């Protein structure tokens, strides 16, 4: 199968072509993927290579899976693959082509952590983290929480996609990063043997984790195969750099939605952190670090100046 360049893919988008031509390549990529339900293997392969070129660690996601996997050509069944190496190094373009050039459209996964991040001028490594919201209702509550704190604008520059379940994924880069972390849970009952049953509402995907990303088509998600992943804003080639203070505000607002009963010995949940305003309205440019301006030269990586 011949993989078209993303330029040729965009040209095939019909009436939008003229408008897309006036945009820069990163804007064109984001617009082309916006609300696009994709079932084309060549487009998915071209997008995976675009993500790789922008510094994201890309892995394949086979139908019915949410973990790195491929389709066994002998049996046609989805098979999990070992992906530890892609948590520390990017795949080669040849590997990505081999994963996404079969007859079966595949999903795209982006590995979180420093492997998909950027090195700053001072030598520090900013890692990629995702905020993963399980459904639309909990995401709406999170947005309302940010609005109540007066910091809703923090989401405006973050790439965001809708998942097949109606949830959301947001992504950002930060020099403060961690392993995947559960931020909010819900109590759903007790098992017959007396164990507490919980479901996760919000979690971060960090070092050792990944997110399935747009334009992963329908047929991939194991529980909602009728729907794919679609971009709501931004794209995964351009991810803003946030300060640790902003990251802590986002996490605190997420943790404030935790519905799990406190465990024995747990400390009370602290009030959500507030950004210092000194009696005036907080400006987004005072919260986004100066490093996000300095690393613009790292193509397709940082936004929010």
Image (cartoon, rainbow, N blue to C red):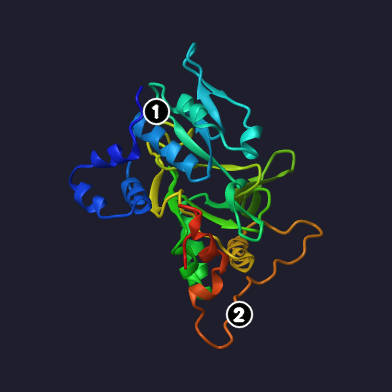
Asked if residue 188 is positioned above or below residue 218 in the image, the reply reads below
- How many discs appear? 2
Which residue does the numbered mark 1 point to in the structure image?
105
Q: Residues within 10 Å of mark 1 (few under 14, many from 20)?
A: many
Please provide percent x and percent y for residue 95. 52, 27
Q: Residue lying farthest bottom? A: 279
Q: Quadrant of the N terminus?
A: top left
Left/right placement of residue 120 relative to residue 19 reads right
Nearer to us in this view, 281 or 24 = 24
Query: Which residue is painted at 77% across and 64% down in the image?
Result: 267
Q: Could you say which quadrant of the image residue 290 lies in?
A: bottom right
Asked if residue 51 is positioned above or below residue 71 in the image, the reply reads below
Q: Is residue 218 visible?
A: no
Nearer to us in this view, 275 or 148 = 275
Please provide percent x and percent y for residue 3. 36, 29
Q: Is residue 71 visible?
A: yes
SS state under label 2 = loop
Q: Could you say which quadrant of the image residue 229 lies in?
A: top left
Asked if residue 280 is positioned above or below residue 219 in the image, the reply reads below
Nearer to us in this view, 4 or 110 = 4
Please provide percent x and percent y for residue 250. 58, 64
Q: Could you say which quadrant of the image residue 247 lies in?
A: bottom right
Which residue does the numbered mark 2 point to in the structure image?
276
Please provide percent x and percent y for residue 149. 53, 74
Q: Residue lying farthest top? A: 74
Q: Residues within 10 Å of mark 2 (few under 14, many from 20)?
A: few
Which labelled disc corresponds to residue 176? none
SS state under label 1 = loop
Q: Residue lying farthest left? A: 15
Query: Which residue is painted at 29% across and 38% down in the image?
Result: 9
């Amino acid at each position: 199968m011949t993989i078209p360049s993303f330029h040729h893919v965009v040209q095939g988008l019909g009436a939008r072509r003229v408008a897309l031509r006036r945009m820069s390549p990163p804007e064109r990529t984001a617009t082309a993927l916006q609300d696009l339900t994709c079932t084309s293997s060549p487009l998915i392969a071209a997008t995976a290579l675009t993500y790789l070129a922008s510094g994201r660690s890309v892995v394949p996601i086979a139908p019915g899976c949410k973990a790195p996997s491929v389709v066994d050509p002998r049996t046609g069944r989805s098979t999990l693959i070992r992906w530890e190496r892609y948590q520390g190094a990017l795949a080669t373009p040849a590997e990505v082509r081999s994963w996404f050039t079969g007859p079966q459209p595949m999903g795209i996964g982006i590995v979180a952590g420093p492997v998909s991040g950027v090195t700053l001028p001072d030598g520090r490594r900013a890692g990629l983290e995702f905020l993963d919201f399980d459904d639309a209702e909990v995401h709406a509550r999170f947005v309302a929480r940010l609005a109540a704190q007066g910091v809703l604008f923090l989401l405006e520059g973050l790439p965001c996609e809708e998942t097949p379940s109606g949830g959301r994924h947001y992504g950002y880069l930060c020099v403060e990063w961690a392993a995947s972390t559960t931020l909010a849970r819900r109590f759903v009952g007790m098992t017959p043997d007396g164990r507490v049953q919980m479901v996760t509402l919000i979690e971060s995907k960090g070092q050792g984790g990944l997110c399935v990303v747009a334009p992963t088509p329908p047929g991939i998600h194991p529980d909602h195969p009728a729907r794919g992943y679609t971009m709501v804003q931004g794209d995964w080639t351009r991810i803003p750099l946030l300060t640790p203070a902003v990251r802590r505000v986002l996490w605190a607002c997420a943790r404030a939605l935790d519905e799990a009963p406190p465990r024995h010995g747990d400390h009370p949940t602290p009030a959500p952190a507030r950004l210092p305003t000194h009696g005036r309205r907080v400006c987004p440019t005072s919260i986004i670090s100066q490093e996000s301006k300095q690393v613009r030269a790292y193509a397709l990586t940082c936004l929010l100046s």
